[in-house]
Amino acid sequence: MHRKRFRIYESLFSRTVFTNALLFFLLTVSFLVLTFFVLSNRSAHWDYYVTGVLQHQQHTVLDYIMKGFSWLGRVRVAFFAICLASLLFLISEKKREAVLIGSTVLSGAISWTLKMLIDRPRPGADIVRVIEETKYQSFPSGHVLFYTVFFGILCMIIYYSQKISRRARTVLISLLVFMIICGAVSRIYLGAHWFTDILGGLIIGIQFLQIARLLYLKNRPDQYKQEIL
C-alpha cells in the first residue's frame, strides 16, 4: 500500500515537472515579447496610462505609506530580511526552508544582470512625478522581483506546512500576496518604475518560484498529499 501511494506521488511529481516546464517556457516567451515592446517603445501608452491613474490621487500621507512599502525592497533591508528569516528557520531546525529563503539573494543578481543587458532608463521627472530617486536601470523591477520571490517562497512554505491550519494558511498567504501587490503599486506611484517594469519583475519572480518549488518538493512525496486531497 505504501509503495502504491509513493508511486502515485512520484507520478504526480513527474506531471508537475512537465506542467512547470511548459509554464516556464510560456513565461520566457512572454518576457521576451515584453522586452521587445519595451525596447521598441511600444509599451509607452500603457506605461503612461497606469502611472497617470496611480499618481492621480496624491497625498502626503499616501506618499509615506508607499515609501514604507518600497523601503522593504531596498538592498540592505532586503538582505537583512533574508538573513533573519533564514536564521529563524535554522533555529527551528528547518534547513531546507532556510536554504530556500537564502536563495532569494540570487534575485538581486538576476535583476542587476537583466537591467544592465536591457538598459532601460528610469521614468524622468519631466514625464512623471518622481517621489523617490533610484539608481541603476529600470527593467525589470528589482523590488518586484524580490517581493515576488521572498514573499512567494514564504507562501509556499506556509502552504505545504502541515502544522498550520487551513484558516491560518489562508490569512497568512493573503497577507503575503497583499505585500507583493502593494510593493508593486508603490514602485509605480513613487515614479521609480513603469508598469512594464513591474510585469517584467513579476514574470521572472514567478519563474524563480517554479524552480524553488520543484527543489523544495523533490524527494518529499509526503508533501503531495495536499495536491491529491
Image (cartoon, grey):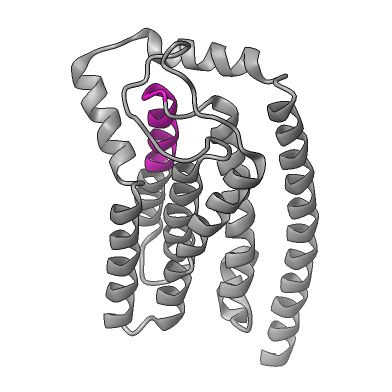
Q: Quadrant of the C terminus?
A: bottom right
Most foreground residue, 103 or 175: 103
Residue 161 appearing in the image:
no
Give the farthest residue toward the left: 61
Q: Is residue 193 above or below residue 166?
A: above
Most foreground residue, 120 or 34: 120
In the image, residue 30 lies at what x, y percent? 75, 39
**Range shown magenta:** 178-191
In the image, residue 201 lies at what x, y percent? 56, 42
Location of residue 64 (image quadrant): top left
Location of residue 165 (image quadrant): bottom left
**Residue occupying the point 26% across, 81% down:** 91
Whether residue 98 appears in magenta in the rendering, the answer is: no
Whether residue 186 appears in magenta in the rendering, the answer is: yes
Give the farthest residue toward the top: 56
Residue 42 appearing in the image:
yes
In the image, residue 70 lies at what x, y percent? 33, 38
Most foreground residue, 91 or 43: 43
**Residue occupying the point 57% across, 40% down:** 140
